[in-house]
Amino acid sequence: MQLIKGGVCAPRGFMAGACHCGIRKSQSKSDLAIIYSKTKAKTAAVYTTNRVKADCIFVTKEHLEDHQAQAIICNSGNANACAPYGRENAEREALACAQYLGIASEDVIVASTGVIGQELAIQCIEQGVSKIELQEDGSNLAAQAIMTTDTRSKDCAVRFEIDGIPCHIGGICKGSGMIHPNMGTMLAFITCDVSIDAHLLQKALVENTKRTFNRVTVDGDTSTNDMCVVMANGMARNKPIVSEDEAYVAFKEALKTVMENLAIQIASDGEGASRLLSVTVYEAETEAQAESLAKSICSSSLFKAAMFGSDANWGRVLCAMGYSGVDFDISKVDISFASQYGKIQVCSQGRGLDFDEKMAKKVLSADSVQVLVSLGQKDQVVTCWGCDLTYDYVKINGDYRT
């Protein structure tokens, strides 16, 4: 497997583009994107677990009842959630895309991101969609158009082989705030040229989501609009994957690589964040135990604030573990911090150690910090990702709507 460039346009037969249609006031920011496959694609999706869902979620679910799609249209600047005429506008957005591309509206996936509760200026989309010029290298244009408070676009692509046939998977995503396990204000659009059964595609997506996007947290809020979509158009011409054989395993691993890469990019670009936090719980009895503990640590506001201050306050790690609801033996817990500047152990068998505070501060001042927690039980390992909690997070969210 090899990391390559190209994002959603890396796989054969996919094009993308974007434009400013007028949803956003600033004309310097694109606010409408399309990803298009030259042929219908087997398509799988997972959605937000929030009981309050945007209307685009319901429309997309209906459109994917046949597990097929040919295009994705996504607007930024307005979530079209809990908004007047939300369902009608989501359907009109799909229709506008379909008419522009000359395909059926049922083959269009609709996504929105932005402010909740405000009516979507659907006329801007209907009148502006024709300004989008689809390009075979247009992935980054689409990635930039779906951004909200993101500070940078996010993409990833890989090349791998199935039975000697070159195959490709590429993706873009957005996400910076309202990010919490079980997906946050997160949109991920993934394309591939693999020929695969639709039900196996869905299975691979669901299982990989649990171990990638669902292990990211920025602020503990789960959004109304989250969606992760994978389109597989089969243009690699590999022997169709119809069982969980070696080809399926290779595909699933390549998909996980792309999804994990995108998930880490989301965590590192958390609103106001100054550093990426990777929390690894190892020597756990079960994967579920390790995951719950790692998520609890990543989600702790006190721990995240300490990381912003480069403060080796390991007690906050143990505290977050203690209220996770998971059983563990504190007398076996070891905690270390690590980064490009070194590694320092701060806790052994549940008790504090004497350590060099200056060294610890240096380790925690890096852009990427690892928190390593050993449970001293068995061999299960889980990593979750998050970021520190800064002053800028409050500034961004204090006037997000206005």
Image (spheres, rainbow, N blue to C red):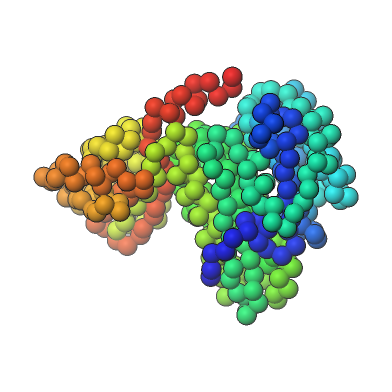
Q: Is residue 84 left or right of residue 252?
A: right
- Left or right of 216, for residue 190: right
Is residue 154 shown left or right of residue 272? right
Is residue 54 at least partly visible in the picture?
no
Give the vertical position of 302 relative to 287 (above or below): above
Where residue 147 appears, as percent x and y from the top left, is 60, 39
Determine which quarter of the picture holds residue 255. bottom right
Residue 94, placed above or below residue 234 = above
Where, quadrant-wise, is the C terminus in this rendering?
top right
Q: 174 or 58, which lies in front? A: 174
Q: Residue at position x 57%, y 52% from top? A: 155
Looking at the picture, how far across and down is residue 210, in whole percent?
51, 52
How far from the left and from the top, in percent, is residue 52? 62, 31
Viewer-proximal residue, 62 or 162?
162
Residue at x-position 48% and y-position 41%: 269
Residue drawn at the location 54% of the way across and 43% of the way down: 152
Q: In this rendered view, identify the residue nearer to me: 391 or 203.
A: 391
Q: Position of residue 329 (x, y in %)?
A: 23, 49
Q: Nearer the viewer, residue 243 or 11?
A: 11
